[in-house]
Image: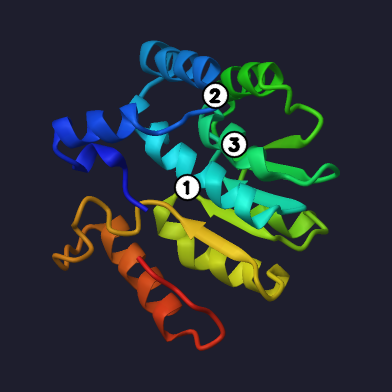
């Protein structure tokens, strides 16, 4: 998945105006807060990606979701839209400075009972979670995507979905860049393509 800001501005504005965003006021406020108070606000998922995640979750109706990379909680709230009545979303982030913002908006979205926040290294936390995952969203340190894949694959039942953000890394992957994250993502993309047990698309 790539962010919508790679589209021409006029197209981006149009599709955002014609995309239903719920809960719109809360997500708008969270976006403003992120841009005013948080470093690197461009990491926010935003309207189109958020609603893609929400729609996917609603269609899947997952009982267990794992998100690696909470940031300020925008995608977290969107992913939670499709949870079953007894479903739980676990979200992990390594930056404790962002936890207060994410917690505030998760609570205001009335999702606190279904969302469990974890702070720390996802590679260390994931093995402690005794769950199988219906839906996984990777949006953290790109260099470790392959490590996350290897760690999570045994806990993905048939029909599970794994969504990985930024797999083209602003086009650098397709251009063969040797930048560390681009190279790591290229390896991750090749791994998914070669794995005969999965169906993948970019």
User: Is residue 40 in view?
Assistant: no
Q: Quadrant of residue 156?
A: bottom right
Q: Could you tell whether 6 is left or right of 108 in the image?
A: left
Residue sticking out furthest to the bottom: 196
**Relative depth, front residue between 28 and 32:** 28
**Mark 3, other Cα within 10 Å: few <14 / some 14–19 / many ≥20:** many
Mark pair 1, 2: CA separation = 15 Å
Q: Position of residue 190 (x, y in %)?
A: 36, 77
User: On residue 76, which mark appears?
Assistant: 3
Q: Which residue is mark 1?
A: 139
Residue for point 78% across, 55% down: 128
Callout 3: helix, strand or loop? Answer: helix
Q: Are marks 1 and 3 in contact (CB under 8 Å)?
A: no
Q: Position of residue 164 (x, y in %)?
A: 46, 57
Residue sticking out furthest to the right: 86
Give whichever of discs 1 and 3 has the lower sequence position.
3
Q: Which residue is mark 2?
A: 98
Callout 2: helix, strand or loop? Answer: helix
Q: Quadrant of the C terminus?
A: bottom left
Q: Could you tell whether 73 is left or right of 130 in the image?
A: left
Q: Nearer the viewer, mark 1 or mark 3?
A: 3
Residue for point 45% across, 13% down: 33
Mark pair 2, 3: CA separation = 13 Å
Q: Are marks 1 and 2 in contact (CB under 8 Å)?
A: no
Callout 1: helix, strand or loop? Answer: loop
Give whichever of discs 1 and 2 has the lower sequence position.
2
**Relative depth, front residue between 126 and 15:** 15
Mark pair 1, 3: CA separation = 11 Å
Q: Is residue 45 above or below residue 154?
A: above
**Mark 2, other Cα within 10 Å: few <14 / some 14–19 / many ≥20:** some
Give whichever of discs 2 and 3 has the lower sequence position.
3
């Amino acid at each position: 998945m790539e962010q919508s800001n790679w589209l021409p501005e006029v197209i981006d504005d149009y599709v955002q105006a014609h995309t239903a965003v719920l809960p719109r006021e809360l997500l708008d406020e969270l976006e403003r807060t992120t841009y005013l108070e948080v470093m690197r606000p461009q990491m926010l998922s935003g309207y189109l990606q958020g609603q893609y995640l929400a729609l996917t979750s609603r269609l899947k109706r997952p009982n267990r979701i794992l998100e690696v990379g909470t940031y300020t909680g925008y995608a977290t709230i969107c992913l939670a839209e499709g949870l079953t009545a007894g479903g739980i979303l676990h979200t992990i982030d390594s930056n404790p400075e962002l936890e207060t913002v994410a917690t505030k908006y998760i609570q205001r979205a009335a999702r606190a009972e279904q969302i469990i926040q974890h702070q720390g290294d996802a590679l260390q936390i994931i093995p402690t979670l005794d769950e199988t995952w219906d839906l996984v969203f990777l949006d953290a340190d790109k260099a470790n995507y392959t490590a996350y894949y290897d760690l999570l694959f045994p806990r993905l039942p048939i029909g599970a979905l794994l969504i990985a953000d930024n797999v083209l890394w602003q086009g650098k992957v397709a251009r063969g860049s040797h930048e560390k994250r681009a190279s790591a993502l290229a390896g991750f993309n090749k791994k998914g393509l070669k794995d005969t047990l999965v169906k993948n698309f970019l």
